[in-house]
Image (cartoon, grey):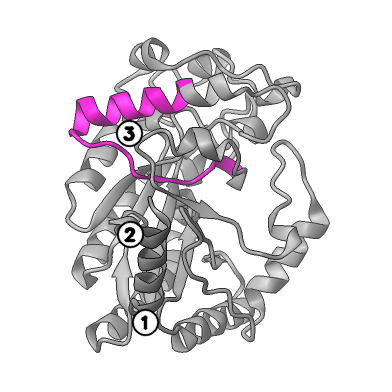
Amino acid sequence: MSEMQAQSAGAERRDSPPTVVLSLDFEMRWGCYDKLGLDREAYRENLENVREVVPALLKLFSERNIRATWATVGALACQDWEEYFRRAPATPCYEDTALRFSEQYAELDPEGHLHFAPHLVRAIHETPGQELGTHTFSHIFMREPGITAEDVDADLAAVVALWKERFGIEPRSLVFPRNQHSFIERILSTPIRVWRGNETPWYHECTDAGTNKIFPRSLRLLDALNPMVRRASCMDGAMNRASLFFRANLPEALWGLHLSRIRGELKALGPGQIFHLWWHPHNLGADGALRMARVERVLDLIANGCQNGRRVSRSMGDLVH
């Protein structure tokens, strides 16, 4: 892109209407294996109920004409372990061996019920307004010692090949596993044209895998409950920063504060600004009726603003078309 084209694109973004972007990190057990290890029952309710959560979310989005990006682990589209091992490149040689994918996970879940959901991936692809993005092929961690550029290239090549073969598309949007953004030049040498960045405060950058950083996590929670915070932002090259992680699991009193934060963000949204809300489908896998009701309440806030012209709903991919 020339300097003149870049300036024109920047001006167009600044003049664009207030925008709401939703992105969902669709990962099932791929996103948790380093934490769950070989405990087959850990977090099982949340993971299994994703099979009901995804269709319910697609229905809610469709009814309200809300567009969303589903940052999907490529492996979820595989039919079974045989296909996964045929397609997947070797796991990166992380220095922390707990981060390396183990073939024992296949023995733990031989039917692949916690690891594969090709029918859900297809349902996302076939639902109007929903973008099938990527969360890498095997949920690789790009800031962990031991990973290489070759690992990143091989992983993304695997998901691009699968998306083209199975759905006739190439992924344009990427969410980095554990929000560990890195290897940007290599990422943008693929069909990917937009990626989700982190919120600006330092405690949103503490994304090391395999750790339990209580202090940064506590600060992120307090941040999410502060109704005065505003984190909408504009596009920064190929990056669109997250504004807020949606927390449907809060006790009622804290939920009220979180909802006030979301309502305030939407009300304050100005031209060229993007409010980017994100979560994981498995976050809604327990206490489903309450949590889905909270999702519906937030979606109604978004949809009402879109219907009266105060804002527009876009996927991540829409930002770079």
In terms of depth relative to the viewer, which is nearer, 74 or 35? 74
What span is colored magenta in the figure?
A: 154-178
Residue 14 spot, x, y in % from top left: 41, 76
- Asked if residue 160 lies in the magenta stretch, the reply is yes
The residue where tag 2 is placed is 315
At label 2, counting other C-alpha atoms closer than 10 Å, the crowd grade (few under 14, some 14-19, many 20 or more) is many
In the structure shown, which secondary structural element does the residue marked by tag 2 occupy? loop
Amino acid at the residue labelled 3: Ala
| Residue 117 tag number | 3
Q: Quick one: SS at disc 1?
A: helix
Reading the image, the residue beneath label 1 is 301
Q: Position of residue 315 (x, y in %)?
A: 33, 59
Residue type for callout 2: Ser
- Is there a contact, CB below 8 Å, between mark 2 and mark 1? no
Q: Residues within 10 Å of mark 3 (few under 14, many from 20)?
A: many
Q: Residue sitting at 18 percent across and 33 percent down?
A: 168
Please name the amino acid that badge 1 sits on. Leu
Residue 243 occupies quadrant:
bottom right
Q: Marks 3/1: CA distance?
A: 30 Å
